[in-house]
Amino acid sequence: MSNSPYLTLNVVELTRETADAITIHLERADRQPVPSQPGQFLTLIVPCGSGKRPERRSYSLSSTPADAPRLSVTVKRVPGGLVSNHLLDTVRVGQTIEAMAPLGNFTTDTNPQAARSLVLIGAGSGITPLMSILKTVLQQEPGSQVLLVYGNRNEETTIFREQLQRLEQQYAGRFQVEHVFSQPKQAAKPSGGMFSRLFGGGTPAPQPAAEHQHTGRLNRTMLLRVLEQRHRAPAAQAEYFMCGPEGMMAEAKAALELLGVPADRIRRESFVASADSAEAAAAQPDGHGTVLADDKDEISARKVTIQYEGTEYVVEVQPNQTMLEAALDQDIDLPYSCQAGLCTACRGKCLTGKVHLDEREGLSDRELQQGYVLMCVGHPLTDDVVIEID
Ligand SMILES: Cc1cc2nc3c(=O)[nH]c(=O)nc-3n(C[C@H](O)[C@H](O)[C@H](O)COP(=O)(O)OP(=O)(O)OC[C@H]3O[C@@H](n4cnc5c(N)ncnc54)[C@H](O)[C@@H]3O)c2cc1C
Ligand code: FES
């Protein structure tokens, strides 16, 4: 297979998940598998809108590597959103879609000998990467247990509801979903027992458990209420993966902090940029090849050298442009997807000079310390910036 980051994929099947969400199943024409990891995302390149370039949007894989050669993404309609509405209204079996190969760090390595407790916390379309992770762990780690706490408005807006029910039956005693409905159609059932069954060392129930349903918002109190039912296994020993609206993830993080869960056991994926993540970049050390964030005043027109696929490009970046925008304007075909500092498709390493980042959500502290930057939210601060794109 070629090393190009681009793929042409055929739409081979569509599944309607809810009134405003569909799963698009994709395959290469030659049916060759495309390497992926659970929790990664595809970048769809969609010619719609009035921009001079096709639109790019990231969609997490809801499929698993075991589904190869099939890659599936699940798209939820965003009111007023350009690409999500275009896809939901026009996508047809048989058409082709351009994409970038799977990317992303919101993933987990599996080990058939592992005996882990995973707690997945999701809401709305945030279920997609969690679905890929949970199916993979259940298939590949017979000793591991998975709890999904899943928030939605009601039963009808719940993506993958039936598939999750089937998985609960198939993996009874190892997998449980706790549904949290803000406006349920049916009365909530009282909760209880599930955590002690899954994590408390008791005998697994021989039959699939009745569905657990809670009424309210998936906030700190709700999550603590669900989690406190775990009697023996300490919260700090589980691994946590969360994906959903920013407010929900902030509440979940606060709940886990109260339970004493170490930060390195909590992983999160953002679909939209948060207001405060740029501040975190200010904590990074100043120095050669590192990142600054509280220095917007120093942004001015500067030249940047970009090393990509064996070629060196010199790009003039205006103060109102990001380094990615400037490169694309010069027809340099750099990789990118979300253009919001979330997905890391545009990641590069700052070899010399200093760069300001408007947003750092996609980069870990370690990556920042190593000098990695995101071209889509990056501005040169010095005249000697050299960026090497992976
Ligand atoms: C790593 C990653 C993975 C993603 N995975 C999925 C996925 O599996 N399924 C999925 O449906 N979407 C996913 N998204 C979001 C997706 O990429 C698009 O942002 C979303 O479809 C909206 O695009 P649009 O063109 O319709 O809206 P736009 O025209 O780009 O935006 C319209 C407005 O909606 C806001 N908005 C954008 N996304 C959301 C959102 N998710 N919820 C609420 N408001 C939003 C924007 O900030 C903007 O104000 C993912 C995003 C990232 C970064
Ligand atoms: S394009 Fe997604 S982080 Fe830059």
Image (spheres, rainbow, N blue to C red):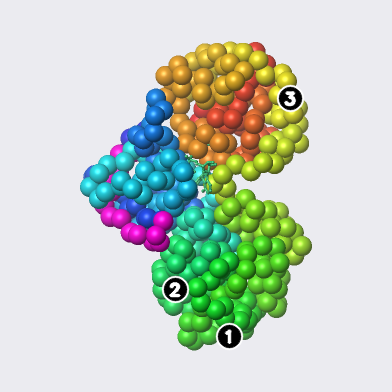
Q: Is residue 32 left or right of residue 56?
A: left
Magenta stretch secondary structure, dominant:
strand
Work out how far the residue at label 1 is from the one at label 3, CA to CA, in angstroms: 57 Å
Task: Give the foreground label among 1 and 3.
Answer: 3
Q: Quarter of the image holding residue 300?
A: top right
Determine which residue is flagged by label 3.
Answer: 295
Q: Is residue 293 left or right of residue 137?
A: right
Determine which residue is flagged by label 2.
Answer: 165
Mark 2 burial class by Cα count in 10 Å: few <14, some 14-19, many 20+ = some
Q: Quarter of the image holding residue 293?
A: top right
Q: The residue tagged with tag 3: helix, strand or loop? A: loop
Determine which residue is flagged by label 1.
Answer: 203
In terms of sequence position, does the residue under pointer 2 or pointer 1 come before the other?
2
Determine if the magenta segment contains residue 236.
Answer: no
Vertical side of 332 occupied by 341: above or below: below
Q: Amino acid at mark 2?
A: Gln
Q: Amino acid at mark 3?
A: Asp
In terms of sequence position, does the residue under pointer 2 or pointer 3 come before the other?
2
User: What is the total number of numbered labels drawn onto the structure image?
Assistant: 3
x, y percentage for residue 168?
Answer: 47, 74
Q: Residue at x 22, y 47 (%)?
A: 94
The residue range painted magenta reads: 7-20
Task: Give the foreground label among 2 and 1.
Answer: 2
Determine if the magenta segment contains residue 12.
Answer: yes
Point out the image quarter for the N terminus. Answer: top left
Vertical side of 217 occupied by 381: above or below: above
Vertical side of 251 occupied by 49: above or below: above
* Res. 230 in view: yes
Q: Amino acid at mark 1?
A: Thr
Q: Residue at x 55, y 28 (%)?
A: 375
Tell me whether the residue at label 2 lies in contact with that at label 1, contact meaning CB atoms closer than 8 angstroms.
no
Work out how far the residue at label 2 is from the one at label 1, CA to CA, in angstroms: 21 Å
